[in-house]
Image (spheres, rainbow, N blue to C red):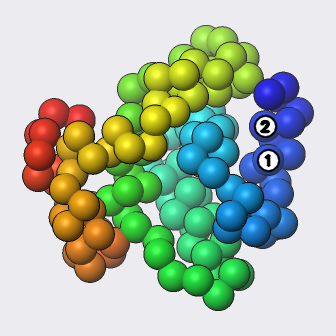
Amino acid sequence: MTDSEILTLVERLERCLFSPSEFHHQDHLAVAVTYLYASDFEAAMEKLRTTLARFIAHHGASGYNETLTRFWLIQIEKHIDRTVCLQESVRRVKAALGRKEMIYEFYSREKLNSPQAKQEWVEPDLKSSL
């Protein structure tokens, strides 16, 4: 993806132009990298939370998960390289974190899908080191 394609992806998500079935894990990673490029971790987290909640509500769905969102943003923050262009950083993050099942090395499905994990950050129950 080029920088322009990445920014278009972000804009399309923010404007709710994707259907939920069109927006995939790799797309989430690209959006999160873009938000982290533009601000610090907490500001990026707030923007991602707001964007995802708006997207979910727009489609009449439920399912926002605070723990899931923060987990991936923490992982991305560890892999992001702000010294390279956006597209290169996105490429590297996707290569390192492209396997969405990775989260289950840290969380049981029960814990990750709990009401508490959906509403607030919950520490991992399988592997403590994030």
Q: Is residue 38 visible?
A: no
Asked whether disc 1 touches disc 2, contact meaning CB atoms under 8 Å apart, the reply is yes
Q: Is residue 104 visible?
A: yes
Q: Please, what is the three-letter code of the amino acid marked with disc 2?
A: Ile
Residue at 11% from the left image edge and 46% from the top image edge: 126
Secondary element at image label 2: helix
**Tag 2: Cα neighbours inside 10 Å, few (<14), some, or many (≥20)?**
some
Q: Kindly give the residue lying farthest to the top in the view shown.
A: 83
Above or below residue 42? Residue 5 is above
Please state the horizontal and vertical placement of residue 62, each as a whole percent of the image: 51, 82
| Side (left or right) of 28 relative to 105 | right
Please state the horizontal and vertical placement of residue 109, each as a whole percent of the image: 24, 61
Residue bearing the label numbered 1: 9
Residue at 82% from the left image edge and 54% from the top image edge: 11
Above or below residue 21? Residue 61 is below
Residue at 68% from the left image edge and 56% from the top image edge: 23
Residue bearing the label numbered 2: 6
Please state the horizontal and vertical placement of residue 44, each as a whole percent of the image: 53, 48
